Image (cartoon, helix red, strand yellow):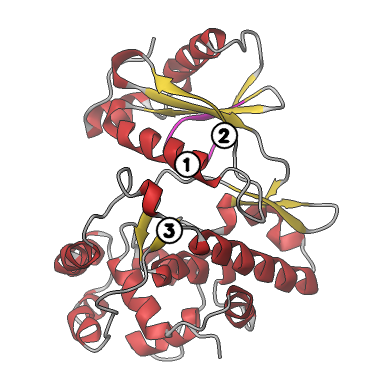
């Protein structure tokens, strides 16, 4: 049995501790007809996720994140067989003890693209980025209306206003130097985000870590992790592309956008990066190429330009 997890303190005490979570995962697998299948916990991700034998993945959602399980289950059901990349097939969705939820899904073939990336030749990297652009375009081409009852935000402009109100303190709390923090409001004032954008299904974390690749052919084989999915402006998804897929490597953002079929304003993408739910510029500045100048416009050019 898994204990209740409804607070940050309970989360920190329970979720990272495999000695606590694994017995509950094994019990749940038995109930789902997979008794005795070996369980291998994935090291990445905020939720406990286990490979169950060779064919299944069990993702667990504590009570504090139960809504994430509902959301991911609905999104995966909506996507089944509709993208050029495979997405996990749902084999079971339900509740477990003390408010926990689960999704039992198929295990996708392939290797984590982030892990494989250093070994991939430059020409294959460029082709993979184009494949990723085509996949994201296909995701955005789907009608999100059937998912509207399950995904937020209901009001995109209200969501942006709320994110804007917290933008300065969000970066300050994550250790961004004050000279950068102080310039956030002025930069956002100069960027006109669309008042009524086309609303699409957003992955929100479209990154190498959520893409799988065949190491024999260097072809993408899958896309996963839809728990933070939303409905909103397509440009919002390009934030993770710039930060975690193309990562400032010359020519890759241009290649991605060409395959996607639309060019995005790099200043708008930077604005969305500052407003993003998971925004952390202290980490970005540490991991990505340094901008040519100490200005937000230079950051936009370095990380999001297709030029």
Residue hosting label 2: 42
Whether pointer 3 and pointer 1 mark residues with C-beta atoms closer than 8 Å, the reply is no
Neighbor class of circle 1 (other Cα within 10 Å; few <14, some 14-19, many 20+) is few
Q: Please, is residue 118 above or below residue 272 in the view?
A: above
Magenta span includes 286: no
Q: Please, is residue 176 above or below residue 189 in the view?
A: above
Residue hosting label 1: 45
| Secondary structure mainly formed by the magenta segment | loop
Quadrant in the picture for the N terminus = top left
Name the residue rendered at 41%, 72% in the picture.
235
Name the residue rendered at 30%, 30% in the picture.
11
3 or 2: mark nearer the eye: 3
Whether residue 28 sits left or right of residue 95 in the image: it is: right
Please report whichever mark, 3 or 1, sits nearer to the chain's N-terminal start.
1
Q: Position of residue 295 (x, y in %)?
A: 33, 88
Say which mark, if any, is on residue 202: 3
Neighbor class of circle 3 (other Cα within 10 Å; few <14, some 14-19, many 20+) is many
Q: Position of residue 28 (x, y in %)?
A: 49, 13
Q: Please, is residue 125 above or below residue 278 in the view?
A: below
Say which mark, if any, is on residue 205: none
Whether pointer 2 and pointer 1 mark residues with C-beta atoms closer than 8 Å, the reply is yes
Which residues are drawn in magenta? 41-51
Q: CA distance from mark 3 to mark 1?
A: 19 Å
Magenta span includes 44: yes
3 or 1: mark nearer the eye: 3
Name the residue rendered at 43%, 57% in the picture.
201
Q: CA distance from mark 3 to mark 2?
A: 24 Å
């Amino acid at each position: 049995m898994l204990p209740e997890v409804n607070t940050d303190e309970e989360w920190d005490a329970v979720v990272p501790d495999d000695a606590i979570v694994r017995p509950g995962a094994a019990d749940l697998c038995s109930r789902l007809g997979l008794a005795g299948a070996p369980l291998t916990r994935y090291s990445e991700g905020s939720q406990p996720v286990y490979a169950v034998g060779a064919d299944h993945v069990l993702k667990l959602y504590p009570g504090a994140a139960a809504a994430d399980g509902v959301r991911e289950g609905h999104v995966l059901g909506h996507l089944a067989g509709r993208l050029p990349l495979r997405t996990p097939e749902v084999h079971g969705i339900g509740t477990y003890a003390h408010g926990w939820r689960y999704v039992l899904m198929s295990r996708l073939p392939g290797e984590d693209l982030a892990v494989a990336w250093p070994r991939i030749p430059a020409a294959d990297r460029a082709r993979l980025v184009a494949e990723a652009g085509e996949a994201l375009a296909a995701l955005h081409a789907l009608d999100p209306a059937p998912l509207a009852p399950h995904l937020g935000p209901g009001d995109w402009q209200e969501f942006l206003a709320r994110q804007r109100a917290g933008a300065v303190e969000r970066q300050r709390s994550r250790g961004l130097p004050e000279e950068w923090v102080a310039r956030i409001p002025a930069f956002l004032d100069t960027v006109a985000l669309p008042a009524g954008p086309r609303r699409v299904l957003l992955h929100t974390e479209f990154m190498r870590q959520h893409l799988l690749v065949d190491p024999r052919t260097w072809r993408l084989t899958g896309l996963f992790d839809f728990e933070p999915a939303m409905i909103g402006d397509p440009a919002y998804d390009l934030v993770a592309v710039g930060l975690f897929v193309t990562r400032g490597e010359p020519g890759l953002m241009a290649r991605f956008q060409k395959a996607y079929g639309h060019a995005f304003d790099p200043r708008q993408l930077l604005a969305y990066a500052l407003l993003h739910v998971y925004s952390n510029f202290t980490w970005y500045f540490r991991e990505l190429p340094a901008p040519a100048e100490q200005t937000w416009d230079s950051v936009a050019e370095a990380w999001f330009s297709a030029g």
